[in-house]
Image (spheres, coloured by chain):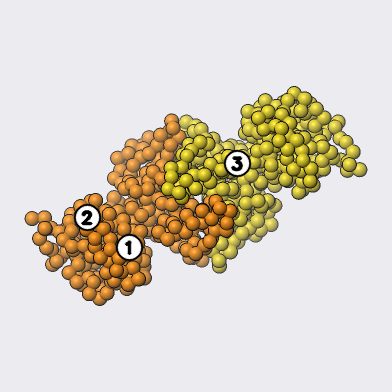
Chain colours: A yellow, B orange
Amino acid sequence: MSKSYRVAILGATGAVGTELLELLESRNFPLADLKLLASPRSAGTQLAFKGEKLPVEAVDEGSFHQVDLVLASAGAGTSKQWAAKAVEAGAVVIDNSSAFRMDAEVPLIVPEVNPEAAASHRGIIANPNCTTILMAVAVWPLYQVQPIRRIVVSTYQSASGAGARAMEEMKAQAQAILDGKTPQTDIFPYPLAFNLFPHNSPLNEAGYCQEEMKMVNETRKIFGVEDLRISATCVRVPVLRAHSEAINLEFDEPFSVAKAREVLSQAPGVELREDWQANYFPMPIDATGRDPVLVGRIRQDLSHPCGLELWLSGDQVRKGAALNAVQIAELLVAKNLLGRESLVASH
Amino acid sequence: MSKSYRVAILGATGAVGTELLELLESRNFPLADLKLLASPRSAGTQLAFKGEKLPVEAVDEGSFHQVDLVLASAGAGTSKQWAAKAVEAGAVVIDNSSAFRMDAEVPLIVPEVNPEAAASHRGIIANPNCTTILMAVAVWPLYQVQPIRRIVVSTYQSASGAGARAMEEMKAQAQAILDGKTPQTDIFPYPLAFNLFPHNSPLNEAGYCQEEMKMVNETRKIFGVEDLRISATCVRVPVLRAHSEAINLEFDEPFSVAKAREVLSQAPGVELREDWQANYFPMPIDATGRDPVLVGRIRQDLSHPCGLELWLSGDQVRKGAALNAVQIAELLVAKNLLGRESLVASH
């Protein structure tokens, strides 16, 4: 008799929540029950799941009773408010927010990189930042062959990384500009359509924004390499969905392009996409809605004998968030790390 | 009696040609005569200059008779066809194409960097590639304080870098996507609106595209440093005008952020634009139509003790092309390197 689990999605109506719902259905996650939770503001609507309409309930003190797994994607504030309560009620929380990522007691997991970290969870497992996940999936297979000395990365991050409303805002801006009108800004501080700007998350004293520091600190934690040298420049670009990254890697010894191609062509979660004849490489529109991180343009760094240049595009709502969370859930199921006393018979 | 010069613009109807016309007027270049030349296809139209309408003539064998200076921006093929003839007729050619840039006998000039190279011209002076000019203006002032060991750059290049028609194509694509239709591609190989892709110029055997190799080779020539280590990743983004660049610099010794700010705040052709409180840095829409290269987000590289991170946006049609060419012309005037036997009295 296989097991199945009672799952709650916290933040079900958001961009990642919608994707979580789709993935639980398409990947046929062993569900005994699915509860959709959101803020009181978003509650009351219904969302489709396996041909049924499921109601979205307002999250409250009783929401986590008899829930085995909570997939949380309603922001750091909501996670801080509810995660401990969910764990107290007996659930495991896979949290997509930044609330617990750097907490030493909380595993931060990319299943293709550090699945073993799941075993040590104490109720909460953190899902990394989207740009970090995409880079980790592409870089870790190379790191395993030869340690990386230094990473310099520049990102090209889409509007949807700031949520569904940000994507709509950018589209409205584009229409305004095409009509010769002045674009309006609300979610973003500056017009994004036909423009771009450095990622506008808060800056630290050294001038790095939070998004950049997530790439630095989270990658170190996921790789388990505390002193990994990383510098990042994160930029918001007028793309609807999927992030891209130009990654410069420095190894201790030369790493041949041929070897890198061989490694990445077999790496889990990676799809090598290079057509040198056609001058075709990964693009956001081809990564959109896809599971793998598309990697290509692997080149010998012209400025360093031990350097490699990589280019990638990946769907940050999918592998960068919802898919990675569902993969963690699947990992917990496979390792029997979920649903302690709350196992129920499969339907 | 001040001198004035008989000038021809070859490629007057293009994006750069139009800008050249505007700059000759606004900067009050000492003109004795202005001749507008273009391919037979574009000839016959008229362009406004100082309140008059000037006819655009088809370029032919007689076009360069009694011309002191040719500003050429009609592509490498046209320049190869006509530059020698113009020089033979007694003119100096400032060529905006890639035709002669790496020719050892042709100076390649960014006036803020290597004005002295103008003295050795033999009739042709080359205007560098747009992304190269923007980077050179921002990086050279730092190089003068302390030699740079290595540059790793990622670019964010606008549609207009591929010409006015490419910009129109991207706008039409954006409208199609907003209307739920399939975007059409003609000039670009892939849809650019709400998407992006690695620069699609031809690739060399190492996998670098021409645009990237221009940044490598032209920067070395302009700086006069043959073995300067540079690696570049050039990316076309859905921005209308102005290119941006994320530049990672490695020096032999630490270079403080404070010193870099001090140097760049006084550097010719640079405008330091950093508002750390407001999280505001250079953006394409603020660089558009402006002369200076906007530089900001100067940060200590987190991954290297001798590293600096820079961010810039610059109008590639203006400083990246037309303005740089006019500045070279002004340099020739100031150094009396123009109009040998063809000087005429000022009007």
Q: Residues within 10 Å of mark 1 (few under 14, many from 20)?
A: many
Frontmost residue, B58 versus A86: B58
Marked residue chain, label 2: B
From the top left corner, tell me how far across and down residue B171 is, in percent: 47, 54
Disc marking residue B211: none
Q: Position of residue B287 (x, y in %)?
A: 37, 46
- The span from disc 1 to disc 3 (Cα, nearest Å) is 42 Å
Q: Which residue is mark 2?
A: B51
Pointers 1 and 3 in contact (CB under 8 A)? no
Frontmost of labels 3 and 2 is: 2
- Name the element at disc 2: loop
Q: Are marks 3 and 2 on the same chain?
A: no
Co-location on one chain, circles 1 and 2? yes
Tag 3 subunit: A
Q: Secondary structure at mark 1?
A: loop
Q: Residue at 53% across / 46% down in the picture?
A: A171
Can you tell which quarter of the image residue A114 is in?
Answer: top right
Relative to A232, residue A39 above or below: above
When the figure is inspected, residue A92 is found, relative to residue B4, above or below; the finding is: above
Mark 2 neighbour class, 10 Å CA radius: few under 14, some 14 to 19, many 20 or more: few
Q: Residue under circle 3? A: A164
Q: Residue at x 45, y 49 (%)?
A: A179
Disc 1 versus disc 2: distance between alpha carbons? Answer: 17 Å
Q: Amino acid at mark 1?
A: Thr
- Give how far across and how far down residue A284 sits, in percent: 58, 52
Q: Are marks 1 and 2 in contact (CB under 8 Å)?
A: no
Cα separation, mark 3 vs mark 2, equals 49 Å
* Residue at the extreme top of the image, as rendered: A61
Amino acid at pointer 3: Ala
The label number, if any, that marks residue B13 in the structure image: 1
Above or below, A120 relative to A326? above
Does residue A20 appear to the left or right of A65 in the view shown? left
